[in-house]
Amino acid sequence: MRAVVCRELGPPSLLVVEDRPDPKPGPGTVVVVVEAAGVNYVDALFIEGRYQIKPALPFTPGSEIAGTVTAVGPGVDTVAVGDRVLASTGLGGFATHAVVPAGSLFAVPESLDGPRAATFTQSYCTALFALRERGGLAAGETVLVLGGGGGVGLATVDVAVALGANVIAAASSAAKRAAAVEAGAFAVIDTAGEDLKVRARELAGGSGVDVVLDPVGGQLAEPALRALGDGGRYLVIGFASGTIPSLPLNQVLLRNRAVVGVDWGAWAMGHPDAQASLMTELLAMAGAGRLDPVAPATFGLGGVAEALGSLTGRRAVGKVALVP
Ligand SMILES: NC(=O)c1ccc[n+]([C@@H]2O[C@H](COP(=O)([O-])OP(=O)(O)OC[C@H]3O[C@@H](n4cnc5c(N)ncnc54)[C@H](OP(=O)(O)O)[C@@H]3O)[C@@H](O)[C@H]2O)c1
């Protein structure tokens, strides 16, 4: 097998691609030949040693995969050789083969090809968990999605539209705004040139938006908070801009707004049954055509530094995947 290996912590340029012995499945696990692996911000944090979990060196990054089961270990009766599956791996996904616990696998609906399936879990689970479980989104409400052309952003546009919401996407480039419109946003805001608060309120009919979903942080946060109407909810997802914003609490008090933290990863680990239900629901929606994930940009294993750089360099439109 071939695998991307992190031998020393640092920038993606230090990653190497190496030959490794083909893996064999242990009890309760399967070997998956990887069709595609999702590339996420968290992978960049892992290899730079900036994530809260610090794996021992050397390690293979890669936290989500899709592929085909080629061998099953003792005691596995829930999947069989030949099944197309996707899984959250935490680590080990940037490789031609991965060993995965059988209990963590989900069947891939026919509507999702390898790259779409591999990049589905983190972005779509975050979107649905945030909008519905944390944000209490109702059909007919208006959602403002910051970073609306990014990975979480485009998934959120797709999920919010499927839940019957009206979506405004804010993004810095024409390509990202076009992708958000394609995904179902009824309007877009150019964060590089327009006044976010004024434009969002106008687009929401003057009364303000009901929900803000923010994976970006930084200087967009306060105008987005001020764009919320009565009872509006501000969903804190992440800080891709690199700046954790401070928000004036008077703006939370006014109009009975709420600022709500969203930590899907911690929730999923603490509530595995609820997480499995969330995934089953999302995959059923995708299988029925109610969700339509945008095709990710793809790179080979040797393009891992470029793939990670497209995320950290703000160039990626939607998701990014490695296709070994
Ligand atoms: N809380 C959770 O449960 C959870 C779950 C998944 C991900 N996350 C976090 O959410 C954040 C976004 O993830 P993502 O997958 O959507 O990332 P992404 O695809 O890279 O999108 C992030 C967006 O942030 C904006 N941005 C602004 N300044 C940036 C900068 N200096 N570098 C990079 N992007 C910048 C960009 O949009 P514009 O160019 O339009 O500004 C970009 O499209 C990450 O911090 C991730 O760790 C949190």
Image (tube, rainbow, N blue to C red):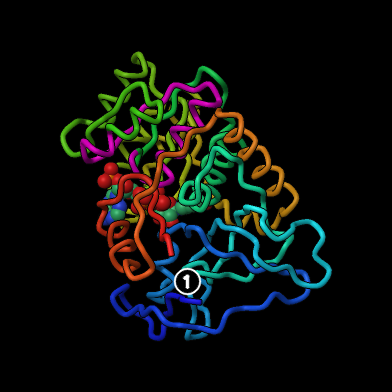
- In this rendered view, identify the residue nearer to me: 165 or 281: 281
- In the rendered image, residue 8, in percent from the top left (x then y), is placed at 38, 85
Instruction: Give me the residue at 46% from left, 76% from top.
Output: 2
* Residue 101 visible in the displayed image: yes
Q: Is residue 139 magenta?
A: no
Instruction: Give me the residue at 60% from left, 54% from top.
Output: 86
Q: Is residue 281 above or below residue 45?
A: above
* Residue 245 visible in the displayed image: no
The quarter of the picture where the C terminus appears is bottom left
Q: Which residue is mark 1?
A: 61
- Residue type (three-letter) at the residue carrying disc 1: Pro
Q: Is residue 43 above or below residue 114?
A: below
- In the rendered image, residue 39, in percent from the top left (x then y), is placed at 42, 59
Q: Is residue 69 above or below residue 186?
A: below
> Which stretch is magenta?
149-177
Q: Is residue 292 left or right of residue 22?
A: left
Q: Is residue 52 left or right of residue 146?
A: right
Instruction: Give me the residue at 50% from left, 36% from top.
Output: 258
